[in-house]
Image (tube, rainbow, N blue to C red):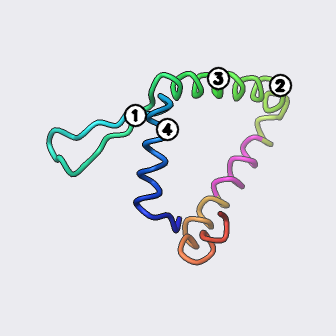
Amino acid sequence: MNVTPGAISQLLAKLEQQQYIVRSINPKSRREIFVTLGKKGTDLYQAYEKVDQKIVDKYYSKLSPGVIDQFEYAVNKLHAIVRSEKGSDYDGLE
């Protein structure tokens, strides 16, 4: 992603200060840090889940099973292509 460790650390510190994440040291390996959702992060995720469910209920539920299968197949194929070309073209997606 072409981001320095220092930039990531600053971003995580800001997210932690705003209670979106919680950082904790792995007791088995002090060099590892666990990052989990904080109070605001959990609230935001739950709000996203509600919106996502509304989209499914309103739009995807109107698709036939065959169309859903085709859509899933296409998304999986696209995902495989992106993963196989991760090195050079992936950087251009930023």
Q: Which mark is residue 58?
A: 2
Q: Nearer the viewer, residue 4 or 78?
A: 4
Q: Magenta span has 71?
A: yes
| Numbered disc 4: secondary structure | helix
Tell me which amino acid carries mark 4. Leu
User: Which residue carries the number 1 mark?
Assistant: 36
In the image, what residue type sits under mark 3? Ala
Per the image, the residue denoted by label 3 is 47
| Labels 2 and 3: the sequence-earlier one | 3
What is the span of residues highlighted in magenta in the rendered image?
Answer: 68-76
Q: Nearer the viewer's eye, disc 3 or disc 4? A: 4
| Residue 59 drawn above or below residue 9 | above
- Identify whether 84 is placed above or below 17: below
Q: CA distance from mark 2 to mark 4?
A: 33 Å
First along the sequence among labels 2 and 1: 1
Q: Position of residue 82 (x, y in %)?
A: 61, 65
Residue at left offset 17%, top offset 46%: 30
- Of mark 3 and mark 4, the one earlier in the sequence is 4
* Residue for badge 4: 15
Cα–Cα gap, marks 3 and 4: 18 Å
The Cα atoms of the two marked residues, 2 and 1, are separated by 31 Å
Q: Secondary structure at mark 2?
A: helix
Q: Earlier in the sequence, mark 1 or mark 3?
A: 1
Residue kind at label 1, given as amino acid type = Thr
Separation of marks 1 and 4 at Cα, in angstroms: 11 Å
What is the x, y in percent for residue 94?
65, 63
Q: Residue at x 77, y 29 (%)?
A: 55
User: As shown in the figure, which amino acid type bears the numbered disc 2?
Assistant: Lys
